[in-house]
């Protein structure tokens, strides 16, 4: 499991549900720029460059 803060996991869960940055900002009661900064930090910690890759790495599909 990736080493992320509780807040970063919270943001990723909303991201995985398809929320936009603005919707995430409203839900977490922060600014859009704070969401962008959180995403930058999440991408760096996960070693990815986009939202889809971050979701795939944080929530991998179970093996069959």
Image: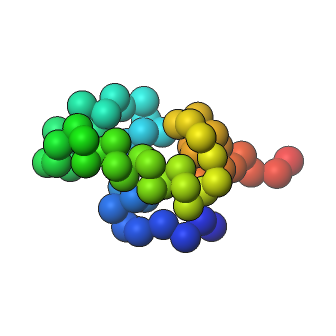
Q: Is residue 59 visible?
A: no
- In this rendering, the answer to whether 39 lies above or below 46 is above
- 3 versus 48 height, above or below: below
Q: Which residue is located at x 33 percent, y 62 percent?
A: 7
In percent of the image, x 31 and y 33: which residue is there?
Answer: 21
Task: Give left or right: position of 42 versus 14.
Answer: right
The spot of residue 63 in percent (x, y) is: 82, 51
Report x, y in % for residue 5: 41, 68
Q: Can residue 2 be seen in this view?
A: yes
Residue at the farthest right position: 64
Res. 27 image quadrant? top left
The colour scheme is: rainbow
Q: Where is residue 22 in the image (x, y as percent from the top left)?
A: 24, 31
Question: In the picture provided, is 25 more to the left or to the right than 16?
Answer: left
Give how far across and how far down residue 4 sits, in percent: 48, 66
- In which quadrant of the rendered image does the N terminus lie? bottom right
Please identify the quarter of the rendering in which residue 41 is found.
bottom left
Is residue 14 or residue 36 the one in the foreground?
36
Q: Residue at x 35, y 31 (%)?
A: 19
Vertical position of residue 45 compared to residue 19: above or below: below
């Amino acid at each position: 499991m990736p080493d992320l803060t509780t807040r970063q996991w919270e943001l990723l869960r909303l991201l995985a549900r398809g929320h936009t940055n603005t919707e995430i900002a409203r839900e977490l009661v922060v600014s859009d720029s704070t969401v962008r900064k959180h995403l930058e930090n999440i991408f760096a910690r996960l070693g990815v460059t986009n939202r889809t890759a971050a979701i795939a790495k944080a929530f991998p599909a179970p093996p069959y």
